[in-house]
Amino acid sequence: MGKTQPTPGGAALTDLILCLFRANNLTLAWGDRLVARFGLTSARWQVLGAIVLSERAQPVAWIARDLGANRQNVQRIVNDLHREGLIVFEPNPHHRRAQIVVLTDKGRRAYEAAINAYNPKVNALAEGLSLEEIRTAQRVVATLRERLEGAMDAEKHAWPS
């Protein structure tokens, strides 16, 4: 049985995926160092950001969906944020057990402090890259994400229950 070889596009995409893995790891480590002084980690900051940027208060499952993350992992982070007083749980009028996650004043201050530390750093990282380059990279990664989501959905439905 012969081995399937990647096409030139498949090989280039593999290189991109490996680069994304490394960039993701470095981004998380960089973020952890950036926000540690505010009592945050990259993961906590990401969840706070999802809460801040959502149009309305949401339950954990919706936050996880918006982040493309595992619900159990987001629940663990939300529980940590709750223990730290950065979020509170409020009743959900649509679902008795799935409480709504709401930012506290302390949580908003932590998030804003992190953003204020982040902005000059991200501006420095962007130096020397054109807007066109950044937007092209974002489009490629977004398309890859969409295709991976579609592939994951297709595989989920292909496996017998």
Image (cartoon, helix red, strand yellow):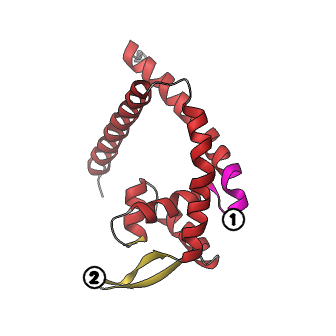
Look at the numbered discs 1 and 2 and tell me whether their residues touch, using CB distance below 8 Å: no
Provide the residue designation for mark 2: 94
Q: Quick one: which residue is furthest to the top in this view?
A: 8
State yes or no: residue 120 in magenta. no
The circle on residue 39 is 1
Question: Range of the magenta residues?
Answer: 32-41
Q: Main secondary structure of the magenta part?
A: helix
In depth, the one of 68 and 36 nearer the eye is 36
Report the amino acid beneath label 2: His
Q: Secondary structure at mark 1?
A: loop
Horizontally, residue 55 falls left or right of residue 101, namely left
Horizontally, residue 29 falls left or right of residue 152, namely right
Local crowd at mark 2 within 10 Å, few (<14), some, or many (≥20)?
A: few
Measured as percent of width and height from the top left, residue 76 is found at 56, 69
Q: Is residue 72 above or below residue 82?
A: above
In depth, the one of 16 and 137 nearer the eye is 137
Q: Secondary structure at mark 2?
A: loop
Measured as percent of width and height from the top left, residue 142 is found at 36, 38
- In this rendering, the label closer to the viewer, 1 or 2: 1
